Image (spheres, helix red, strand yellow):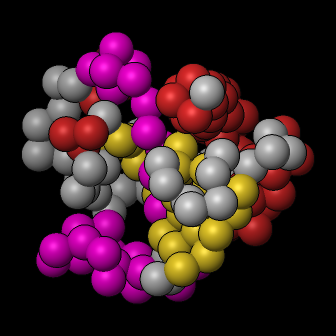
Amino acid sequence: MASNVASGPDPDEVTTWITTTYPDTVVTTALSATFFSLDASASPNFATIVTTDEHDLGAPSNLARPGVYRLNIGVGRTTFKRLVGSTTDPDYAELDRVIPHPVYAKQHWVAILNPSRRTFDEVVKPLIAEAYERDAKASS
């Protein structure tokens, strides 16, 4: 687990990476969240960044901590099962660990709070690529 909140990319850097890597991405900011999709309606989206707990019942991610954000990624069933399928009682506030999304796990969404640089490069980027491709297939 990363102990330093600033050890990896911040939300702006994540946004820049997504929009540079996938230039057809539509970015919508609403309700204290940033949505990444391939449709101007922002739905469906393939990833989101949230910086407040207002969308989660009971504030499980404790996003009120300074500098903490959650990156949410919609992946396929196989990837979801491989990464978090056997997870029981996840710590939704743990930094730098892929967890089931606290609200949308049933829709195969995973989440990570403040990924470290290494985790972002080795784990998160491939997950975003998968989510983007899934959204592209659904949009075509």
The residue lying at 43 percent from left, 30 percent from top is 75
**Front residue of 67 and 133:** 133
From this viewpoint, which residue is outermost toward the front? 140
How many marks on residues?
Answer: 0
Could you tell whether 52 is left or right of 5 in the image? left
Q: Answer whether residue 77 is magenta in the image.
A: yes
Is 96 placed above or below 57 here? above
Could you tell whether 97 is left or right of 116 in the image? left
Q: Quadrant of residue 53?
A: bottom left
From this viewpoint, which residue is outermost toward the left? 89
Is 139 placed above or below 48 here? above
**Front residue of 48 and 30:** 30
Inspect this view and state whether residue 68 appears: no
The residue lying at 22 percent from left, 25 percent from top is 85
Q: Which residues lie in the magenta part?
A: 52-81
Is 95 placed above or below 74 here? below
**Front residue of 28 and 83:** 28
Is 6 placed above or below 101 here? below
Position of the C terminus by quadrant: top right
Q: Quadrant of residue 24?
A: top right
The residue lying at 74 percent from left, 49 percent from top is 25
Q: Main secondary structure of the magenta part?
A: loop
**Front residue of 116 and 60:** 60
Inspect this view and state whether residue 79 appears: yes
Q: Position of residue 21 (x, y in %)?
A: 84, 39
Q: Answer whether residue 121 is magenta in the image.
A: no
Q: Position of residue 95 (x, y in %)?
A: 45, 56
The residue lying at 19 percent from left, 32 percent from top is 87
Q: Position of residue 9 (x, y in %)?
A: 72, 57
